[in-house]
Amino acid sequence: MLGEASTTAIVKTKNPKGFIENKKVAKQGGSVAGKARLDLETKTGKKVVSAENYLPASKKKNNQLNKGEN
């Protein structure tokens, strides 16, 4: 969610044109979110994503993905 919000804010500020510029902005937004996650993990001493809070893909979604592989 932070990555999307960051990217949206950067888009509104920089007003990118075309695929290449939008791709750069998307990477910048992702970078903001990644740095925030690492900072949170450092301050709390806990991983944000772990085996305890990982949710596997739903069965319906897995079935849809598998149909494309056949």
Image (cartoon, rainbow, N blue to C red):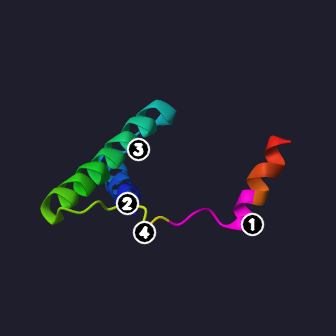
> Residue 32: x percent and y percent?
27, 50
The residue labelled by disc 1 is: 60
Which mark is in front, 1 or 3? Answer: 1
Crowdedness of circle 4 by 10 Å Cα count: few (<14), some, many (20+)?
Answer: few
Q: Are marks 4 and 2 in contact (CB under 8 Å)?
A: yes
Q: In this view, does 55 lie to the left or right of 52?
A: right
Task: Tell me the kind of residue under disc 1.
Answer: Lys
For mark 1, give the secondary structure.
helix
Q: Is residue 40 left or right of residue 55?
A: left
Q: Which mark is residue 26?
A: 3
In front of the other: 32 or 50: 50
Magenta region, residue range: 55-62
Q: Which mark is residue 53?
A: 4
Crowdedness of circle 1 by 10 Å Cα count: few (<14), some, many (20+)?
Answer: few
Q: Which residue is pictured at 30% across the width and 45% down the height? A: 31
In front of the other: 5 or 62: 62
Q: Are marks 4 and 3 in contact (CB under 8 Å)?
A: no
Which mark is in front, 4 or 3? Answer: 4
**How far, Cα to Cα, is label 2 from label 1?**
23 Å
Dot 1 or dot 3, earlier in sequence: 3
Task: Tell me the kind of residue under disc 2.
Answer: Val
Crowdedness of circle 3 by 10 Å Cα count: few (<14), some, many (20+)?
Answer: some
